Image (cartoon, rainbow, N blue to C red):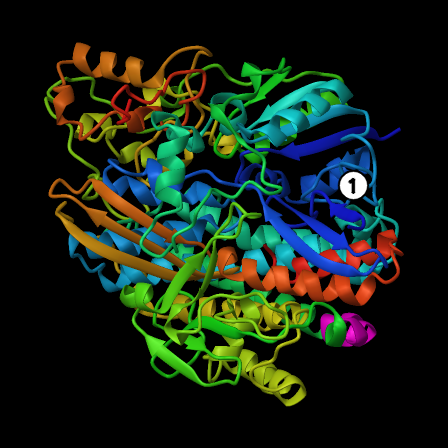
Amino acid sequence: MAVKVAQEWLNSCSGCEISIVDMGERLLEVLTKIEFVHGPVLMDHKYFGQLGDGPRMEIPEAVVGLVSGGIRNEEHLEVLAEMRKKCKVLIALGTCATHGGIPALINSYTNEELLDRYYSTETTDKCDSVPSDGVPPLTGSCMALDEKVKVDIYLPGCPPNPDQIFAVLAGLLGNTPVELPAKSVCDFCPTHREGKGGVKKLRRFLQPPQYGAPGEGIDKMRCLMEQGILCMGSVTRGGCGGEGLTPRCIEARVPCRGCYGPVKPGTNQRFDMLNALASNGVDISSLPESVSLLRFSGAHGLLRPSRKGKEA
Amino acid sequence: MGQVINIQPITRIEGHASISIQLDDQGNVSDSKVHVMALRGFEKFVEGKPAEELPRIVTRICGICPWQHHLASNKAVDRCFGVTPPPAGRLLRELMQTVAHAEDKVLHFFFLAAPDFVMGPDADYSVRNVMGIVKAAPELAERVVKMRYAAKMVLEKFAGKAIHPIAGVPGGFSKPMTEQERVEILSKMREVLDFALFTMEFAKTQVFPKYLNEVTELGVIKTGFIGTVDEAGAVNFYDGKLRLMKPDGTYTDFDSQDYCDHIAEHVEPYSAGKMPYARAWNEGFSLDMENPKGIYRANTLARINVADKMATPRAQAELEEFREKFGRPAQYTLLHHWARLIEEVYSCEHAIELLENPEITNPDVRAKVEPRAGRGVGCVEAPRGTLIHDYTTDENGLIKSANLIVGTTHNLGPINMSVNQAARMLIKGGKVDESCLNKIEMAVRAYDP
């Protein structure tokens, strides 16, 4: 019997869903074993019945629920509650669902500041009031799923590597749950480290790192942090390279920015990074700003509007 | 007041939206609204961030077209900082842009749109989806999945990350292409071109002819169009001038840096998304079905309408056949699908051209960049339409302000009109069924929002 799966996306960009499709031919294999009962991006099941005349929002029961995106409005809360009620195993898919993700950068600002700017850009005509007809009200901040419901499996990543999505789904289908690595990006990084301090200031990523001839292996490139370029690898959960192992950004010779969220749940990537820098003798005032260090994990109250209404 | 019919959510689209249709006492349509829910506020929260980081942040506006946000952002930062990428850096960016278009069009046509045509608009909802296609036509499905994956893995393997890319950098590209990589990617893109030509034939012989009635009736409206063309007036996805065409086919070309003179955004109380319109036409904004004002469309149909030609031979032959049938500008909404497949052919042909340029493996891919105060507009064609990123930086190269006009938003007004047209045509005397509601959604899906 095919395993029933429901999919939902909240404050999301659809990158996680595309990452599912990026399983390639494995997707066809998975599709023979599961049956989607709900999933707005893939199929036409409607919230209030197929003619839209049902009394309440209803998602069919499923064994597995995949939810991407964080919580940003009242409709997200309603959909999430219904998914939790109907799904035996709820998977928080992607960093928005697990830690707020990039959209949680808005938590440095109030809703008023957001709306003021969005509806008054250079090209926007003056409007008397913010749209509210059929548009759900915003919640007070952008939240991760576990701020409102119990999450059974955390599958972070922006997006999660398709290999990991496949491993988790195959594990669930075969009843052999998969543990994702609780290691840092650095643990998977093949660049070579000399271990000597010497970096006193960080430089912005405005010129290429040194990396030898084109086509030379990543293991010939020196650790970007040791080259004086901020790299979030040490405070970021690894696994983004999937079965290929090499962290994906490093593969392109650019530094990690933290897209899998913190290594250990509940820790603070900004705090841990600044601490690591300071204890290695790096002048943290050489960073142009530090809110960006929480760019993937600003939910859970970690980013807040400052009292002056400026950045946290 | 009569009944309200809700389609919630609109499905097999890439965003979050719903439709409400107001009926009068006789059960005929008096009004309709497309409600766009998403409001994330990128314009606000990028403030204060180092500009060179933006190409890695704004990608999250859309996980389906992250390359276009990535590249528009890089182009905007290039301008703020006053830097021009070396030729190979530019070529690599354009190659990524072109391959990303090729991948996206396969995804949209087969995964999102095709169920309506292959399974049929009246098929039960439980099979009217890509899973239904996998069961009904397993060989086709396998080929689709393989080819899309091939194009996607070109991006992933060469540029590290295909979804939410990082390899474009202000000043150029993060890594050069080796000769071996070039040869491998070239051979992959030749395969994808074969598949694009197969898809075009498949659609022209087995899909479109069956649905000519829908094409000529469903969601049909008359609007202007916008798109990017090169110096010769051919479609270009990466760079060029913007061309804004009136419904009568006359047009104005302008530099994207001056977009504010030509485009404004109107706010309706029922949509969080703003509705761009042609400020330059000096007629204001109106979605009135008889007499719309300022309304133009972006996306595939718009691009092939505004362009004089396609820059590659097979796509040009397809365009000529298309124009022979539908004229210029073609207005039928469902022709977006046809235009999408012509662009698919172009994407593959153009990727091959870029890969055959020996300059592409030049190791000099990134110019040195110094942060400074400036302003820059970065504009590229996203699959869903013209994409504009406009940044102002302070003397430290931090973002002072940002304005974004995203592909799909150009079409929010037109989508409302197409839904209204389809609803009026399909709902009479209060009679509503699943098939008619799905057909109304098909008018939305054509825009691939």
Is residue B272 among the parts visible in the rendering? yes
Q: Is residue B387 above or below residue A36?
A: below
Quadrant of the rendered structure where residue A234 is?
A: top left
Residue at position x 37%, y 84% in the image: B232
x and y percentages locating residue A265 in the rendered image? 47, 12
Compare residues A73 and A173 and report the one nearer the observer: A73
Quadrant of the rendered structure where residue B76 is?
A: bottom left
Is residue A216 among the parts visible in the rendering? no
Compare residues B83 and A237 and report the one nearer the observer: B83
Indicate yes or no whether the magenta region holds residue B101: no
x and y percentages locating residue A131 in the rendered image? 52, 44
The quarter of the image holding the N terminus of chain A is top right
Main SS of the magenta part reads helix
Q: Is residue B114 above or below residue A92?
A: below
x and y percentages locating residue A61 in the rendered image? 81, 25
Is B70 displayed left or right of B294 in the figure?
Answer: left
x and y percentages locating residue A251 in the rendered image? 37, 38
Q: Is residue A219 above or below residue B190?
A: above
Compare residues B185 and B160 and report the one nearer the observer: B160
Name the amino acid, label 1.
His
Compare residues B216 and B147 and report the one nearer the observer: B216
Q: Residues within 10 Å of mark 1 (few under 14, many from 20)?
A: many
Which residue, given by chain and number where applicable, does mark 1 sit on? A45
Indicate the secondary structure of the residue bearing disc 1.
Answer: loop
Number of numbered discs: 1
Residue at position x 69%, y 52% in the image: B111
What segment is highlighted magenta in the picture?
Answer: B203-214
